[in-house]
Amino acid sequence: MEIELMRHSAAHVMAAAIQRLFPEAKFGVGPTVDFGFYYDVEIGRTVTPEDLVAIQAEMKKIVEENEAFVRKEMSIDEAISLFEGLKQQFKVELLRDLKEKGTTKISDEEAKDIDPAKRDVASVYTLGGFTDLCRGPHVETANQIGAIELNKIAGAYWRGNENNPQLQRIYGLCFTTQEELDNHKALLLEAEKRDHRKLGKELDLFHIDEMVGLGLPLWHPKGAILWRAIEDFWYAEHLKNGYDLVRTPHIGKQALWETSGHWGFYNDSMYPPLEVGKSLKDEQDEKEVAVSERYLLKPMNCPFHVQIYKNGMHSYRDLPMRWAECGTVYRFEKKGELSGLTRVRGFTQDDAHIICRADQVEDELKKVVDFTLFMFKSFGFDIKDIHVYLSVRDPNAEKSIGSDEGWRFTEEVLEKVANDKKLNISKDIGGAAFYGPKLDFKIKDCLGREWQCSTLQFDFNLPERFKMTYINAEGAEEQPYMLHRALFGSFERFIGLLIEHYGGAFPTWIAPVQVMILPVADRHAEPALGLADELTKKGFRAEVDTASESVGKKIRNAEMKKVPYMIVFGDKEMEGNLTIRKRGVKDQYGLVKDEFIEVLLKEVKDHLT
């Protein structure tokens, strides 16, 4: 029995249980999600944790009763009449859309292609005394569903529109066996401990302040040092790999975004223009602008890099050009969709653009793939677990930029490179953006969860819109190929991933504090500060816990802060004989100062080389 079939059916069992307990309940939709299902409902009040217990108990009864899932097709008008009688207005709304468009999910424009003959059929099923609107398929009988547990309640606007009523979204888990369910619950508990929002607060890395603005993280000293260690590594490795660094502003004239096309096709993710032709005081005084100058916060760095390219003439001998920038961009996100560091409004992309000739494309792609895998490995990820998605054009698609020859060439070379590099690839036909095919890299953290990180994207749009050219070997103008490339995706999201992957216990080379020195008594504080200063001058990040507390308490504090090394500093340590304690290890050991410095140097340098 397929698990997706079980999860889909479990959503309906839950809805049937809710109707038994709350006969006046109104039902929205109930799809499957990763590891389970949910249903959006309205029961006339807020759903409580106690309600979940009662609903789950009722679900158990329905499973034991072993009612059959019975499917029936009827005309949409019959279905509308049926659900009007059941006073299920959300189902009626879906059916009216189904009648008008042939679907409940797509736009009026897309609905034009739906076969009119399919617009008059609705699928209805019953489970005991419960009736619902659904295409199916389902399990045959309720007792074929595996282990179920309801686990979460959230709010959800009907059809995702904040102008619509807010429903209660009840989530459940569903697995084939109880053992699988228990294992997943253990994983959820571990994930909760590793939540980057929780650890970000506990480790004093960052916070998000409502007065500053939601989706705009504030990085505390330790978080900023963590960021800096990662960024320094990023810059050093890019220089080693033949990239040049560029820097661009945070805003650009409206004309730039009109030329790039973002003004029209990316406007859902952009903020409204800024009027820079007058001051804030002029605005407060309601003065009319003399000459309008409209700028926009940048959602991407690409058009700026293009303008740097267009600042001069280029020969085929100048290519490839590899330009990299850690550039902060701003994208519109709804308030309810923001989440810690993983969904923000301002974020820093580790961006690069490669401008090259057709005969250089394959080699450049291979270099980027190697660089991507190197970066993941450097941060402790198993590159054997990387899953790469090749997004190509739908052969029937009408809307795309670039020639058929260009699309064919770039899709084929992406697939060839992915296979040559023995990447674990899945092809997503129709997944490509209208301006070019791409490779997306997803990595797994220590809990086996996939995270979207690196992207390698061809772009036919910007070279064409900005008339990018170079002089080829025959002396004629030719349009170059342009590759967008991000390794982390964004620093914010990647750091959120690192926090959860390591549970905040970062490897020594990026740890915000690498060594914590713990004076035994007040008389040891000054010499301990001297040792910290010496380590700092050698490039290490060391701090001293000068609190008037016992050594045991200081050790516990350092462990809670997840510092890689601790030095218990007493009388003999004043002579240079250090007592070392490593994070997570109870046993202490002795090293002379110079030996300890060599250990630190080796641990950091071995990684960086």
Image (cartoon, grey):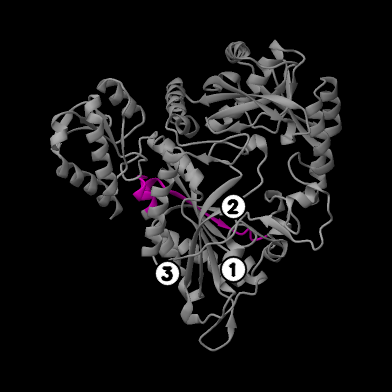
Residue 474 higher or lower than 493, as above or below:
below
**Tag on residue 6?**
none
Label 1 – label 3 distance at C-alpha:
22 Å
Q: Nearer the viewer, residue 156 or 503?
A: 503
Which numbered disc, 1 or 2, marks the residue that appears first in the sequence? 1
Query: Can residue 436 be seen in the rendering of this structure?
Result: no
Is 13 situated left or right of 475 in this image? right
Query: Can residue 489 be seen in the rendering of this structure?
Result: yes
**Tag on residue 329?**
2
Residue at the (39%, 64%) spot, across then down: 239
Q: Which residue is mark 1?
A: 306
Res 469 quadrant in image: bottom right
Q: Secondary structure at mark 3?
A: helix
Quadrant in the picture for the C terminus: bottom left
The disc labelled 1 sits on which kind of residue? Val
The magenta stretch spans which residues?
A: 375-396
Inspect the magenta stretch and tell me whether residue 383 lies in it: yes
Which numbered disc, 2 or 3, marks the residue that appears first in the sequence? 2
Tell me if mark 1 has few (under 14), some (14-19) or many (20+) residues whose alpha carbon lies within 10 angstroms of its own: some
The disc labelled 2 sits on which kind of residue? Val
Q: Which residue is mark 3?
A: 363
Horizontal and vertical percent position of residue 82: 83, 24
